[in-house]
Amino acid sequence: MDTIAAIATGKAPVAIGVIRISGPETDTVVSRVFHPDCQKDFSALEPRRFYMGQMLDATSRVLDGGMAVRFPSPASYTGEDSAELHCHGSPVAMSELLLALFAAGARQARPGEFTQRAFLNGKLDLTQAEAVIDLIEAESPAAARNAAMQVNGVLGRSLSAIYESLTAIASQFYAVVDYPDEDIEDLNVEQLTATLREAEQLLGRLLATWSRGRLLKSGVRTAIIGRPNAGKSSLLNALAGFDRCLVTDVPGTTRDTVEESVLCGGALLRLIDTAGIRETEDLVERLGVERSKSAVEGADLVLAVLDGTAEFTEEDGAILELASRCPHWLLILTKQDLQSGGAEVLNLPGEFPIPPEGIISLSSVTGQGLDALESAVATLFPDGTEAAGLLLTDPRQADAVGRARAALCRGLDALRAGLTPDVVLADTEEAMGAIGELTGRTAKEDIVSAIFSRFCVGK
């Protein structure tokens, strides 16, 4: 395998830039571009210690001063001989240093190639490798915690335990078949049933985390709906912390959906400010209303915004009916700073739905009541701290766990129907194959390639 190099800190100017190198010729390549102040050869430097020295360009001229560190195989991220060069983060200087490494015998690393080598060399399983990019791209503390725990192997260990229990079943069956003369205990139906049931239940609990994990990673699509001038755009601006939307006293200012991502109650909300919903003859505004209704259909959460200073109308009722179709919704009374009676001012008719969390009265101007909104969101979308590392966050993961569980369910049904253990073995091996796709034991090359194509260069 050849030696690769890449800038790990991106192309933007930074205080300290890092270049990573990995491969069998790492020591040789780095020794041609880095001269330690201690006058030792790079290969003789103590591992995992930083050494000051001079960085040279491709013509052996001093380019910068900085530090270098060695990570000899196998105690490195990739499992190969590796190194890092740390210097001033000028994009020009970093590019020149990278070119010097290429001239010394390295080549440009492909996106995700460092982590791919770690996977191929057994330093990470596939769940850990996927979690690396999830950690890099995490947009909330909860998503970062879950990814970090998966990088540490929490999910992989859980899956491996299930895989090993199924392997024990398969290996015992084949041992009995292949060595009939040996004194090997045959498969016991009760024991087989108990093992399959336990594995199926564990996979079922894991699959149940997918809905939460998806929202944790991708965010909660949140549609803000209401009549024109109800305070929808002001609410988005208050949550975002800046004037993302134009706010005026003229009804119908927002004619298209406006999106912004914010952290609220520990959850990442993908806010969608929609056009005010009302009957209108204006063609452009009517198109905006249709988009508002479409946004509700694809939302995970709806914030139904009603003007807390205005009388309840039939249009408000239609908005509540529309919001209640979403799995999760909250009723927001705005403009609290302009009235003193709170929810009672609305005089909400009893036949209209109210969310379980009740009515949240707030002011986007003063910020009063926003804490109640955050608490309600946190209740609806808990951050998953108690299950960090065990939340499935990728459709591929959910699909594989689902197929493994389905195979075990078929096996259990076969046992209940009185079929012999050899019939059940096919379902057991199918489940093992699906779990193997998750951890990388049986993953096909195209699956592995697709996973690492998401990575950035230098990771």
Image (cartoon, helix red, strand yellow):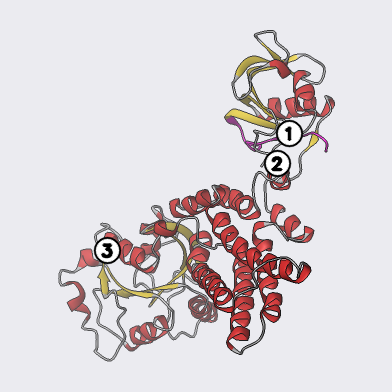
Residue matched to label 3: 372
Can you see residue 256?
A: no
Q: Nearer the viewer, mark 3 or mark 2?
A: 2
Amino acid at the residue labelled 1: Ser
Residue in front for this viewpoint, 157 or 312: 157
Assess whether residue 286 is covered by the magenta stretch. no
Provide the secondary structure element on which disc 2 rests: helix
Q: Quadrant of residue 96?
A: top right
Residue 216 percent across, percent down from the top left: 48, 61
The magenta span reads 1-14
Residue in front for this viewpoint, 416 or 16: 416
Can you see residue 101?
A: yes
> Residue at (59%, 81%) from the top-left corner?
412
> Residue at (56%, 55%) from the top-left corner?
157
Q: Residues within 10 Å of mark 2 (few under 14, many from 20)?
A: many
Q: Label 3 vs label 2: CA separation?
A: 45 Å
Q: Residues within 10 Å of mark 3 (few under 14, many from 20)?
A: some
> Magenta: predominant secondary structure element?
loop
Q: Quadrant of residue 167?
A: bottom right
- Pointers 1 and 2 in contact (C-beta within 8 Å): yes
Rendered view: 403 above or below 82: below
Choose the circle earlier in sequence order: 1 or 2: 1
Amino acid at the residue labelled 2: Phe
Residue matched to label 2: 114
Residue matched to label 1: 22
Choose the circle earlier in sequence order: 3 or 2: 2
Assess whether residue 2 is covered by the magenta stretch. yes
Q: Is residue 128 left or right of residue 388?
A: right
Rendered view: 39 above or below 113: above
